[in-house]
Image (cartoon, grey):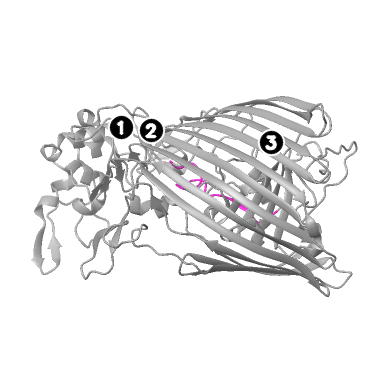
Amino acid sequence: MSVVRRKARLRKALFAAVLSSAAALCQTPQKPDNPTQPSSPNGPPVAACRPGMSVCVKPCALMPPAPDQTLPGVLCAIPFSSSDSFTALHLFSEVTRGAEGGELEGYGPYSTGLRLGINSYGQRSQANTFQLDGAPNNEPWLRGPIIPPSRQSAECLCLAAGQVPASLGPAAGAAVDVRTRSGGPTWHGAVFYRQGNSALNARNFFDGADKPPSSSHQSGFSAGGPLRSHSWHVFASAELDRSRQGLTVISTVPSALQKLGDFGARPLYDPLTIQEIRPVEFLRQPFPANRIPLSRIPEPSRRLAALFPAPNLPSAFHNFRHTPSRLTNSDRVDLSADHSLSALSLAARATWLRRSLDSPSALPNTAASDIDQHANAALTRSSAFSTLLAATWRGAHDLVHSLRASHSFTTLRSSASDSGLDASAALAIPGLGFEGIPVFRLTGYAQLGAASPAPFRLRTSTWHLEYTASRDTPSHSWSFGAQILRHAARGNAVEWPVRGVFLFTPDYTSQPGMDGTGDAFASLLTGYPSEIRRDVQFQPYRLRGWEWSAFAQDRFRLGPVTIDAGLRYSLLPPLTEAAGRLVNFNHNREALAVDWFAARNGVNRYAGAGYNRRAFAPRLGFALPLPRPSATVLRGSFSQMFDTGPYLFRGLLAR
């Protein structure tokens, strides 16, 4: 049972009460016939994996034993045979994958099809924390993970869901920490090649007689071991993925008669005949026989109508089947090194990832898009880089100190599949450019044009510095620390693409106030869009933002009850723009106006925006083992977080 409470100032709180078996939280697989015990220089031995297992679940090295665990959900999973390690999380927890057809998570224009987001306790990906070796792994634009887990380089995935400890950052639903491999005490390596195809796949319900083909080719290697001195250990891995996925895209296209203006029994009304018969009541005259005269169809409408193919399915709706292929290529390199002394441990890691997605058109021989069916009619290129330096040492009073510094950046660029086309010449609409045809969104019909907001270019970066200290005593487990994050985003992505968006609805060819009349394609034929939108970013915006935080946490016992109490403080100023190009609404005027410019005429550098300087977020959880012989643990928790949201929304004042 979970209830989410939202308050002003973008504060989120999560209450969770879960009754579950202690054995279900951290499971250890049965011992195989021929066990192996691969070791981790950064922790205890890793549980052995059985052939065919997608993950192995082991007691979490980062978490206490199950009866003392205060989190409603906790898991450590080791990727084994699944190329998508996040898929393993939902097998042993309530975590689900991000929205597959969403514009923010999944196969939308800001993604290359990785679908890395997760949902936990009602919280979407943007409200969850992702870490890589303890360093932040959330990019600022969408707040999704930067570097996905890798089967070759990931040692384990650790999930804390429900009540997220104060040390794991600002998360309302879950925190996922991916731990990468180290070199190990002996040299070892692996080379792999995997090939898959759709020969044995079941036919999709919507497929025709011919199943769209799919294929994948994955290859790579990994190697690690000690250097000559045996105090340094190194690890390296590389992966390549080339895949082709056959899609079955079902769309609604106009019939041949509709392209000529004949809509049969569908009542159509002439938009030029509207008149007011009484106050606020209007009436239109019908087209004779619900047929638009050819003389009333302008040349741009004729050319747009010709872009729709003829139906190939026997239905008035969902009457066209298209089976294109979606091409995905990715390359990845991971490097790590660690150095262990008696009182000091050093670690370094670097990861580089490049990915491209050639998303097909929803219709043949033209650009058309349907995000829900993974057809964007766009070419998207992305790359990411992440590096980490970490030091851990034991100081006075048995304090264990840890210092981490990391840097990561992402680049993303997208273009329409018909980029370079002279849209004005092709459609006889003046004022268009060469970035591809505009988006023509018709209610009830397939959408022409590539998915918005293509074309765009976007680069984000994050600098991170963190210090933590911890101490364990017989009765307490203390930890405290501080963190500084510096985010930046530079790009020209806007809400409405520079190609333009034409929205057509039945309104202009319907009888006002009468349902079942009019048609969006008829409105296109007559040349009457309900709305036209176009955004032009003359220069790239350069967004900047700081995040300051500190935490203190303690775990202790009161009789049979284990209590985990923590407090996290966050200072989250609003975004700034490098050249001060921010503008906001002036709420002090009787007539609302957009004239609050950053750092001008007494307006602060945040364009009048303020922020909460008292963002104290308590975290509290308890675990009570019920009397024997029951193996049940009663858990309850309270979590609160402060979050300002992704830069996609926060950067509106610069767009």
Q: Which residue is mark 1?
A: 435
Judge left or right: residue 527 versus residue 534. left
Disc 1 packing (10 Å; few <14; some 14–19; many ≥20): many
Contact check, label 1 and label 2, Cβ < 8 Å: yes
Q: Which residue is mark 3?
A: 151
Could you say which quadrant of the image residue 87 lies in? top right
Question: Gap in Å between the C-alphas at discs 1 and 2?
Answer: 8 Å
Instruction: In the rendered view, tell whether residue 362 sits above or below residue 516.
Output: above
| Residue 235 rendering spot, x and y as whole percentages | 72, 31
Highlighted magenta segment, given as a residue range: 93-109
Judge left or right: residue 85 versus residue 424. right
The secondary structure type at the circle numbered 3 is loop
Which sits earlier in the primary sequence, circle 1 or circle 2?
Answer: 2
| Residue 264 rendering spot, x and y as whole percentages | 23, 45
Camera-side residue of 192 and 347: 347
The secondary structure type at the circle numbered 2 is strand
- Residue type, numbered disc 3: Arg
Instruction: In the rendered view, tell whether residue 88 sits above or below residue 247.
Output: below
Tell whether position 48 is magenta.
no
Question: Gap in Å between the C-alphas at discs 1 and 3?
Answer: 38 Å
Question: Gap in Å between the C-alphas at discs 2 and 3?
Answer: 31 Å
Which sits earlier in the primary sequence, circle 1 or circle 3?
Answer: 3
Q: Which residue is mark 2?
A: 415
